[in-house]
Image (spheres, rainbow, N blue to C red):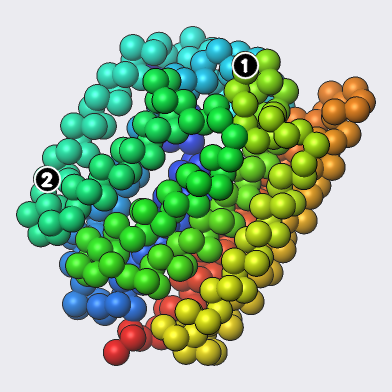
Amino acid sequence: MDPRTFRRVLRIEGLVPFTVCAIVIGSVVTLWEAGFSGSDWTLFVIASMTALLIHIDAHLWNDIMDLEIDRQEKSRETGRDRPLVFGWATVGDYRKMSAIITVLVVVLAAYLTAQRIVIPLLVALGFFFNYWYNHPRFAYAHKPFTEWYIFPWLVVSVTVTVVYAGTGIFSLLAFILSLLHGLIATCFVVSMMRRDVKSDQLGRKYTSSVRYPGLPHSTIYGIVTLLVAVLMLSPLARILGSERAYSIVLTTVIIAGITTALGAGVDQLCTRARYSIFPDFESKANRLMVQQVGASIVYAVAIAVMFVGSGGKG
């Protein structure tokens, strides 16, 4: 197996804005809920490692499921290496890596369960999201509207899990902050679906963009993110107080506005590509999508900074 395969399996552009940022948000919520001395950071780290492993396993199964579709993709324009397509690795290699990861996750989950009894349900939920979306037997990645009922909740499940591992608490604050970040992070996924519409069509992958190509999906998703941010003001104010709640919502609105504007640019490019010959569509849309990834990472860091040195809820 070519060593370049491991870099692609990690897929930093997806791992960081979703799982890594979810863990960052979880760390500051853990501090808020229980303080540094009152939190079990060993369990927090183990839960974080478990979440990262499940996410990496999802990359493996996604590549297996989309193998024929990826053969249609303009990999150079989208900047994505495809180990299975390029012959760097085989499906058998991927299955072996998945088996090793699954064993590691089970061992880590067993250790966590001794301290946090609900962990098996949370880990099972992680695997459910993984296989439901990525496994060829289910392949919900090939169906429309997964950006609405799967992706934001991935961030929520990771953040709630690591906070529970560290504190023993199911935190409402963790739920709200991770939902907001999940929506912002998913803006780039919607743009990615728009970018990949041609290869998805050829591979009969019926995402929302393929099924309803005339809709400005990225713009719509960004606007909904803005609306949800405003709706979260009241519950955040009850938990954190008005000043910090306004700061969080204002930050969310600003970043969501940026991702919406970038997504609108992707929608415009997609519309142009539908009605004209546009060989640079994938590369130009990809640049906007990468900027959305950066915005989502900036958002997670900004939220974390707001809690640094602020003390806990007590």
In this rendering, the count of numbered labels is 2
x and y, in percent, of residue 282 in the image: 75, 30
Q: Residue at x 22, y 48 (%)?
A: 121
Tell me the element at label 1: loop
Say whether residue 154 is visible.
yes
Residue at the image position 81 percent from the left and 47 percent from the top? 265
Percent position (x, y) of residue 208? Answer: 65, 35
x%, y% of residue 61? 40, 25
Q: Nearer the viewer, residue 290 or 189?
A: 189
- Amino acid on which disc 1 is placed: Gly
Residue that numbered label 2 is attached to: 110
* Residue for point 44% across, 33% down: 133
Residue 179 location (% of width, % of height): 48, 61
Camera-nearest residue between 124 and 251: 124
Image quarter in which the N terminus is found: top left
Q: Earlier in the sequence, mark 2 or mark 1?
A: 2
Apparent side of residue 79 relative to residue 303 in the rendered image (left or right): right
Per the rendering, the mark at residue 203 is: 1
